[in-house]
Image: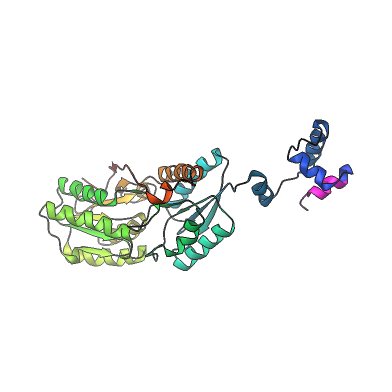
Amino acid sequence: MKKTTIKDIAHRLEVSPSTISRALSNHPDISEALKIKIKEVAQAMKYRPSAAALHLKRGSNKTIALIIPQITSFFYPLVIHGIEAVLHSQGYTLMILPTNDSLEREEENIGIAYDHDVAGVLIALTKETVNLDHFQTLKDSNIPVVLIDKVIEGTPYSSITIDDYKVSYQMVQHLYKTGCQKIIGIFGKASLTISHLRYRGFAQALADLNLPHETSQIAFVNSSSEAYTIALDMIQHHHPDGLYVMTDEIMLGVMPAIAELDLKVPEQISVLAISDGHLAQFMIPTVSHMKHDGLELGSLSAQKIIQYINAKNNNLLWNTPERIQMNTNIVFLNSTK
């Protein structure tokens, strides 16, 4: 079906397109009676102004770009839901640009966001991202940016995360309190700041508790399948009674490995993960986890980017980036004692 244009409405009413445009924009030169008539016909003809027209009319774009590694993960759909709910309530629309964890795609998507003159950018970095030089165009254009979930230390951009170091430290403490004496940890990609922050918390807790801590007791992996292979090897070699799992993706590899080894959970090995909880509750057995709430992360990040948009001429946006850390709590299910 052909899209209705201003020219179509003008032809129907036998007036000029400029008259239609001014009436739809509530221009004072157009009588109220004619405005009402034109709007009624426009509605009957299912006329919708283009995004570009709305942009010019409002004087600012009402679109936020969300750049994320993937849409079909266990975590990001909830993040998207949290973001969209807040943006919709404030009259904003959401542009989702997945990267498939590719730095090249991330750079392309930042260009797309810039070309669309978005009001702000929310971004969860890829596994390949080691610096943010490609963000400079956004910064130079005073487009607010908020990093979510994954960050790189020392950047001039605000971020919303959990306290990765503290969370990992507390997880080891909990495993220890439930009787674990030999704890191994499986972490995400080694190049990620988030992996190292979580590893440091894990390692410090082992040291403070005087528990064994050897390099062979930890592993950095890139996928669920690699986590499965590594877990099989580490468990058979070290015979741990506690297992720290950094993400849902890693959990998806670890739990089948434990099942294949025919180990009883938690009687022979306890498992504690960082998770938003949705995957954890469908594992067999269900997995106790430090809850990382994707819905809350999405809601907070949307609120923050709108706050920055409303104050983006304020130099504080760039001079004093905020490091917002969400609260977490352990959800006790069936994989720990």
- Location of residue 277 in the rendering, given as x and y in whole percent from the top left corner: 36, 46
Q: Residue furthest top?
A: 33
For the rendered model, the colour scheme is rainbow
Residue 130 to residue 317: above or below: below
Task: Work out whether residue 4 or residue 269 is closer to the camera in this orientation and state it.
Answer: 4
**In the picture, which quadrant includes the C terminus?**
top left
Stretch of the chain drawn in magenta: 1-11
Say which of 170 and 155 sits in front: 155
The x and y percentages for residue 287 are 30, 49
What percent of the width, then of the height, locates residue 8? Answer: 83, 49
216 horizontally vs 143: left or right: left
Number of numbered discs: 0
Picture coordinates of residue 235, whole percent (x, y): 21, 63
The reply to whether the magenta stretch includes residue 7 is yes
Depth check: 110 or 59 in front? 59
| Residue 240 as seen in the image, left or right of residue 155 | left
Please indicate whether residue 151 sits to the left or right of residue 266 in the image.
right
- Residue at 15% across, 45% down: 177
Q: Is residue 208 visible?
A: yes
Q: Is residue 264 magenta?
A: no
**Quadrant assignment, res 239:** bottom left
Name the residue at 19% across, 57% down.
203
Q: Residue furthest right?
A: 14
Q: Can residue 71 be seen?
A: no
